[in-house]
Image (cartoon, coloured by chain):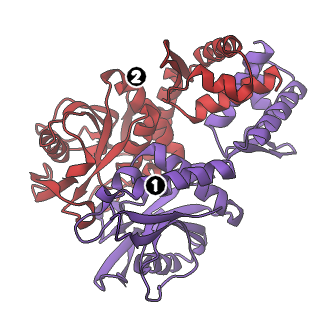
Chain colours: A red, B purple
Amino acid sequence: MKKTERMIALTEILLSRPNELLPLGFFADRFNSAKSTISEDLVAIRETLHMTGKGSLETVSGSAGGVKFIPSIPKEAAEQFLENLAETLSVKERILPGGFLYMADLLYDPAIVRPLGLIFAGIFRQKRPEVVATVETKGIPLALMTADSLGIPAIIVRHGNKVTEGSSVSINYISGSSKRIQTMSLARRALETGKKVLIIDDFIKAGGTAKGIINLMQEFDAEVVGLGMLMEDAVWNTSRLVNEYLALLQFMGIDSSSGKTIIKAKKL
Amino acid sequence: MKKTERMIALTEILLSRPNELLPLGFFADRFNSAKSTISEDLVAIRETLHMTGKGSLETVSGSAGGVKFIPSIPKEAAEQFLENLAETLSVKERILPGGFLYMADLLYDPAIVRPLGLIFAGIFRQKRPEVVATVETKGIPLALMTADSLGIPAIIVRHGNKVTEGSSVSINYISGSSKRIQTMSLARRALETGKKVLIIDDFIKAGGTAKGIINLMQEFDAEVVGLGMLMEDAVWNTSRLVNEYLALLQFMGIDSSSGKTIIKAKKL
């Protein structure tokens, strides 16, 4: 294999296996090259990634060592993406009867949730979460893409009790905005005790659901290290049940003259 | 930028924007290079990807043309992955009271569903689906990763009716194994009429749910171009409501001497 081909193949392997520690010997065997050659190649890849802002290479030395690709999104690209998303969401046609904002098409589109996952991962990576948790249904793609960018699994809290997941822990919670009592549950075997958990969801209003997940996590002795919400309802003027969260977008209300929704994107 | 750095950056851009048509002019501007230089670089990338089986570069010529990275997984790697997954699923501890098989931890792990999405995409790409559909909840990560690998959006059919998604179409269906009448619905605005739809789900037994989604798709004049299931219950010996589907794994029952589940992986 020529040097150029090796560089391309090396880049491809690192990018397609993000957050995975790959020993230098693995590459040396695959490309039939000396480890020193691979090391030089990795320097070039690290510098290029640093220049483009698309991620970094983390090196772990020693016999159990290797190299790991940590994906990221440049700050300006992330902010531009959020601005565009806010703009897309502001069109009049997205306001549903009852004043709800239609977002499901965007929440289920990989081209939208993939960058959002990278943004959440960039914000919360230093908190070293071991699991991403969400509650079904609309937050699942966001949570999954965040978990993928962080290289950790996701868990999905269910409404009610699901017989196909074995014994589970259930809690009742009061939805903060509708004041209805609801149940959420998580299978016992879904989460080992004592894990660091990052909670991701699509929308926060009064915070009842978020508070419910936090309470459920306590039943597993988990440590909640962060809460990331795609959007917060900034019109909600009563106190929230949860205050320490980060929202990428803010719903500011409806402009009475244009009829358009006003949505603000966060500066990162 | 040196040639090596340019090759790395080019590879990174193509891989991080799969299924997106990128004009040669975009690269020429970004790297301050002639289009002919970019073309030569792309030849080297195409050959390397071809050699490693990790995908292909599709070129569209003309003024609206460009290049598109189509991700794939080599056949041997895919089969090996399914074998390992079948092995992981066969352990005794995964059998739940009621005879259910616990799979949720794997279904929500990006490291598992990412390759599964690539496998489904490889199988169904030639059918040219425009949307991936699934029903909540456990099939969502699979459907999302399949959609991501195909470069198309996903839609999620909900149980019951959800007020936050606007007017919707609902159908009643009979779960084939439990014989209970259930409701599933999809928001009117979630799917334009006349689309080609690929249905993805985690498990098929009698096929009632799959049949329900197919019926719901008919209400949107959609053409169902394929059904991909992670696992079929091969013990189910009554006729199924749906027969034309592809399952990656087969649940063959429980071995009475070892107590282990017998799961067979499909040869691709």
At horizontal 30% and vertical 65% (from top left) the residue drawn is: B162
Residue A105 in picture, x, y percent from top left = 46, 55
Which amino acid type is marked by label 2? Answer: Leu
- Name the image quarter holding residue A7: top right
In this figure, what is the number of numbered marks?
2
- Name the image quarter holding residue B166: bottom left
Q: Residues within 10 Å of mark 2 (few under 14, many from 20)?
A: few
Disc 2, SS: loop
Q: Residues within 10 Å of mark 1 (few under 14, many from 20)?
A: some
Give above or below for A65 relative to B71. above
Which amino acid type is marked by label 1? Answer: Glu
Q: Which residue is mark 1?
A: B87
Residue A55 in picture, x, y percent from top left = 54, 22
Q: Which residue is mark 2?
A: A268
Evaluate if marks 1 and 2 touch, with contact meaning CB atoms under 8 Å apart.
Answer: no
| Disc assigned to residue B190 | none
* Left or right: B226 in relation to A243: right
For mark 2, name the chain. Answer: A
Residue B5 in picture, x, y percent from top left = 73, 17
The Cα atoms of the two marked residues, 1 and 2, are separated by 44 Å
Q: Residue furthest front?
A: B257
Residue B19 in picture, x, y percent from top left = 67, 46
* Left or right: A200 in relation to B142: left
